[in-house]
Amino acid sequence: MPVIVSLLPVLIFLLVLNSLDTFKLLKPVVIVSVILCGFLSALFAYPINNFFFSTFDERLVTGFTAPFFEEILKFIVVVFLFYRNKLGFLADALIIGFASGAGFSIIENIFYLNHIETNNLMLWVIRGLGTAIMHGTATGIAAVIAQSLISKKEKIKFHYLLTGLCGGFFIHAVFNNFFLSPLLQTILQISLLPLIVIQIFTISEKSLRNWMEEQSQSEFELLRMIKKGEFKSTRAGKYILSIKSRFSPEVILDMLAYIQLHLELSIKAKGLLLMKEAGFESKKDEELKGMLNELSFLAKSIGKTGMRTLIPIIKLSGKNLWKLNLLK
């Protein structure tokens, strides 16, 4: 019974979180990999916490140093996925952050199960519904804060990640300092968390739909103009003409091909999102794979300087890279 009560609630909550995501953008293998990273973060935290417990006062370690280092370790995989452009919206960030915290809590509770011999069911209820859910919540909220800041500027900056991490640390530290009784904290947490989750998913889905609508109109129009041979009359065409003298004719041709191919792939990515929302799974498309390879080849042919020059037409960061990762 202690095993079930202390280990299962956080996994069940993670499954519920993923089921609430309308678009199901995160592959199961990614979520499982993040849980495994959470396992590793707990294993690394163990010797660090042991050192501090042997050196400093227990209350200082429990209330400050343990939350500080544990949140850093849990957040590493989230940062990695941000830089790999695997997270595009708040719902993705929340699920990934919670998965990392869930993995951490599972190893931590396994450790407690092996070292604490007690039949006090309330202790395991508090650890399973309180401490374990807290670990997932703290890292999940940290990821959501960072994602929110990153989305506004379409750039990943260190202080955005640091702000998110501070949010996670604050939640963890407040929980560990027991300003309320452990049972009351647990009840308060499981009462408020569903409301927070629903709000985050609502905002995330609204943001995704708005982004799709805004981009789709401009992309369809630009692609239509290119195919009709009227690209020169568009703002993008005039911009390319203004930089024509700075690059060879071959590079300019590659730039034009890159713009058209990027638009086609972007439209396909939005189609994939609509399919996911409707509950359909996309099949592997060899033509799509060839298009992605061609896009990569064109980027290398254009070079770093040329690609930077294309930024006013095609943003090569944030959601624009994220949506291409959906097609891989």
Image: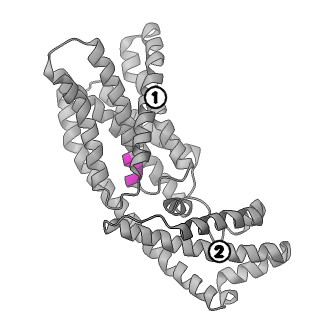
Residue 40 disc label? 1
* Residue type at tag 2: Ile
Of 251 and 90, nearer the camera is: 251
Distance in Å between CA atoms under marks 1 and 2: 42 Å
Relative image position of residue 95 (x, y in whole percent) = 37, 47
Q: Residues within 10 Å of mark 1 (few under 14, many from 20)?
A: some
Q: Which residues are magenta?
A: 91-95
Relative image position of residue 196 (x, y in whole percent) = 28, 49
Left or right relative to 80: residue 256 = right
- Please say whether residue 171 is visible from this viewpoint: no
The residue sitting at 51% across, 53% down in the picture is 150
**Quarter of the image where one finds residue 142:** top left
Left or right relative to 17: residue 265 = right
Does residue 127 sit above or below 154 in this rendering? above
Left or right relative to 113: residue 76 = right
Relative image position of residue 70 (x, y in whole percent) = 43, 28
The residue sitting at 51% across, 37% down in the picture is 76
Label 1 SS: helix
Q: Residues within 10 Å of mark 2 (few under 14, many from 20)?
A: some
Does residue 281 sit above or below 42 in this rendering? below
The residue sitting at 53% across, 71% down in the picture is 266
Residue 121 disc label? none
Farthest-out residue, top: 54
**Quarter of the image where one finds residue 227:** bottom right
Residue 259 disc label? 2
- Please say whether residue 241 is visible from this viewpoint: yes
